[in-house]
Amino acid sequence: MERLRTREKPNQHIPAVFNVGFFLGLAIPLLLEGLVSARQAGPEIPEAGFLLQVWGGFGLITLFLLLFGINCWVWTVAKINYTFIFEFDTKHHLDYRQYLEVHSFEKRCN
């Protein structure tokens, strides 16, 4: 039983929660502005098909990180030991807040 129990880490989540809010606060207005400007009629973008494939790849990575962060949050709320199931190192694994931080940082960089 001792081997199955995880050792709780000290509470270091305040910076991660702040960063998620900060990065998403920067990314959401820019995303909305991009959607509004894309809906307006304008000049044709050259090589738009190739650009959509490149940005689609980045979008899939971002979507994967978002969904995995949400899954980790749900597993934490349901008290499922996902660190043991996925065989993560119990001392050095990322918390769901930190997964969402990676997602929000990538969203800001796009």
Image: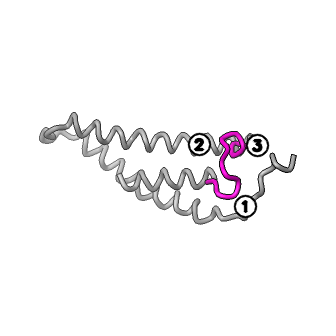
Q: Look at label 1 and name its amino acid.
A: Lys
* Residue 48: % across, % down: 20, 37
Q: Label 2, on which residue?
A: 70
Q: As drawn, is 24 to the left or to the right of 10? A: left
Q: Is residue 79 one of those drawn in magenta? A: no
**Disc 3 crowd, CA 10 A, few/some/many (<14, 14-19, 20+):** few
Q: Tell me which corner region of the image, top left, top right, bottom left or bottom right, holds residue 85.
A: top right
Q: Label 1, on which residue?
A: 9
Q: Are marks 3 and 2 in contact (CB under 8 Å)?
A: no
Q: Label 3, on which residue?
A: 79
Q: Determine the CA span between mark 3 and mark 2.
A: 14 Å
Number of marks in picture: 3
Marks 3, 1: nearer the viewer: 1
Q: Is residue 5 above or below residue 46?
A: below
- Identity of the residue drawn at 39% across and 41% down: 59
Q: Determine the CA span between mark 1 and mark 2.
A: 20 Å
Nearest to N terminus: mark 3 or mark 2:
2
